[in-house]
Image: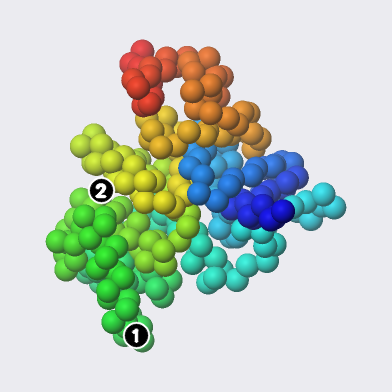
Amino acid sequence: MADNPPLLVDFQHASFVRGDRFVLRDFSLQIARGEHVAILGPNGSGKSTLIKAITRQIYPIQHRDLRFRLLGHDDWDLADLRGHLGIVELDQLNNLSHEVTQRQVTARELVLSGFFNSIGLWPHHRVEPAHERLSREVMRFLEIGHLANRPLSAMSSGEQRRAMIGRALVHDPEALILDEPTNSLDPGAVREFRALMRKLARAGRSLLLVTHHIADVIPEIERVVLLKDGRIEADGPKSRLLTSARLSRLFGTRLRVVRRGRNYNIAPA
């Protein structure tokens, strides 16, 4: 009988400390390869710490029952990990503005820079024909091919985010982590970005969506993890967890959830 394939994320009894306090305590989470999952929680719930743990930017306290594996391995070289996990964080986008304004980084350069783990290209980077071919394919998939030579400083926020996703996709990762992807976008850009997330989900790679906007939980995402105060409050199908009562407790305020088909949203008070 064949062994089960390794999990994408396999954390057991992992605790993370920042300063003098626990931000995730005795944390356990398993995510299968190919699975789409949304992590929901209020500010300060531990979402950012979880992303840093998955991307190996931070490590848990050692414990005899600890398991801290990605794709079946405990140890990863970060360069190798980028070939399996693509990440688009809001912090990356916020830190982008000054550098791209000064250097006039174009969408093409930003996407290509994913091969070099940089923001934009530098003189010492050697761009190979295969890099150019893959970057064109990615930009075409993301529907930004026409923006290839436009500076990011001349793009909308939604267009910039597509280019950042392109930077993460050039390695053809099997999972893409999106951290608060629709924050600060106008309603039209939000609608377009959610359509892009659906396209990414249908393309066969895992989506790990980290957000506090339940409307970001696209129909292709069936599993939801509710996170609060560094612990998992609930983990299961969104039809059971995205309810007015559960989300009101999670966010500490009265909320009314409405459902239209496979889409969920918060109704105006």
Whole-percent x, y for residue 157 in the image = 25, 49
x and y percent of residue 263 in the render? 36, 26
Q: Which residue is mark 1?
A: 126
Residue 23, position in %: x, y? 65, 43
Query: Residue 248, labelled with which disc?
Result: none
In this view, the residue in front, 21 or 58, is 58
Position of 133 relative to 201 (above/below): below
As helix, strand or loop, the secondary structure at mark 2 comes to helix
- Looking at the figure, which quarter contains the C terminus? top left
Categorize mark 1 by other alpha carbons within 10 Å: few (<14), some (14-19), many (20+). few
Q: Quadrant of residue 26?
A: top right
- Identify the amino acid type marked 1: Arg
- Does the rendering let one see residue 118? no
- Mark 2, Cα crowd under 10 Å, few <14 / some 14-19 / many 20+, is some
Looking at the image, is 31 positioned above or below residue 100?
above
Residue to which mark 2 is pinned: 158
Residue drawn at (47%, 49%), measured in percent from left and top? 206
Which residue type carries mark 2?
Gly
